[in-house]
Image: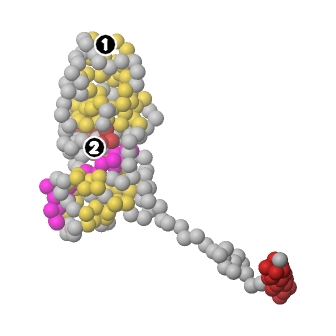
């Protein structure tokens, strides 16, 4: 009877709330997968200033020279792909005047394309048309272990921050041990009581962990690596060998060596006296 009731409940949910199953499939399908190639339609939305749905109003330096793209709604995944680096190229026919060629181009995700389907990418170029593309996620080449944190509307009781500079997007962050929630505009939010400096721990998509000390909660703040973070390893203290004598320590002379040294000096003095007499 329990199994029958369970099946009836599941069928009722699917019938009455079809968006629920769609939402679950979107979340699971939208995870960043490295090493997997995607195909879809490539489109253009014109040259755009820094910003977009990923809130890169002050664009990180690591993306200089790279093309901006808007990721399809599914793989945007609630801002989880913001800041991701991809390689993209044209793979087939094209209608209109397209700018993308058959060579791989470096790009990064700065926006969302709500109407785009899974695999589609909208490019920030002043071109037109639509065509076949292929692309894949890659670690960003100009990443750093000393991260930057952009703050927005924060105060001693509310922090809204955006980690920048990692090779892959952050999946989770904590502030002084309290978990922060990811927002759709590519920020993490946490409530509490905060002093001037906080310890922020974050984990990247590729599993790399960062432990940073962040002082201040306005503008863009450069963090300080803490011990154990990828950019700073604990300093090793050299161990001295127990039976090894220090290099600069003077060794005591033997009795035989002392006598020989005295005798040598005496001969030199005698020789010097003889030279003086001549």
Marking on residue 129 = none
Image coordinates of residue 262 in percent, x first then y, are: 81, 85
Question: Residue at the spot x=26%, y=66% of the render?
Answer: 197
Find residue 9 and report its image quarter. top left
Residue on which disc 1 sits: 94
The mark total stands at 2
Question: SS at mark 1?
Answer: strand
Question: Residue at the spot x=27%, y=43% of the render?
Answer: 60
Can see residue 30? no
Question: Residue at the spot x=37%, y=27% of the render?
Answer: 105
Task: Find the magenta span and give its range.
Answer: 153-170
Q: Is residue 153 left or right of residue 19?
A: left
**Of label 2 and label 1, which has the lower sequence position?**
2
Image coordinates of residue 275 in percent, x first then y, are: 81, 77
Residue on which disc 2 sits: 60
Question: SS at mark 2?
Answer: loop
Q: CA distance from mark 2 to mark 1?
A: 32 Å
């Amino acid at each position: 009877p329990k199994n029958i009731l369970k099946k009836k409940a599941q069928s009722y949910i699917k019938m009455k709330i079809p968006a629920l199953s769609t939402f679950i499939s979107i979340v699971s399908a939208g995870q960043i997968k490295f090493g997997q190639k995607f195909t879809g339609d490539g489109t253009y939305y014109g040259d755009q200033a820094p910003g977009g749905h990923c809130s890169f109003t002050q664009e990180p330096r690591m993306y200089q020279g790279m093309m901006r793209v808007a990721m399809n709604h599914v793989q945007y995944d609630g801002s989880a792909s913001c800041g991701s680096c991809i390689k993209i190229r044209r793979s087939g026919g094209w209608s209109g005047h397209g700018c993308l060629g058959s060579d791989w181009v470096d790009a990064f995700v700065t926006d969302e394309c709500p109407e785009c389907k899974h695999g589609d990418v909208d490019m920030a170029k002043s071109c037109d048309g639509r065509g076949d593309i292929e692309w894949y996620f890659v670690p960003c080449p100009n990443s750093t272990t000393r991260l930057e944190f952009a703050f927005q509307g924060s105060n001693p009781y509310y922090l809204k921050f955006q980690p920048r500079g990692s090779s892959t997007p952050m999946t989770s962050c904590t502030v002084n041990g309290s978990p922060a929630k990811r927002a759709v505009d590519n920020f993490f939010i946490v409530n509490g009581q905060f002093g001037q400096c906080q310890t922020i721990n974050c984990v990247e998509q590729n599993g790399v962990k960062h432990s940073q000390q962040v002082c201040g909660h306005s503008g863009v703040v450069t963090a300080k690596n803490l011990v154990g973070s990828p950019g700073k390893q604990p300093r090793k203290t050299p161990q001295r060998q127990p039976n090894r004598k220090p290099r600069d320590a003077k060794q005591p002379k033997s009795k035989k060596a002392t006598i020989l040294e005295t005798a040598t000096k005496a001969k030199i003095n005698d020789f010097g006296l003889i030279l003086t007499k001549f």
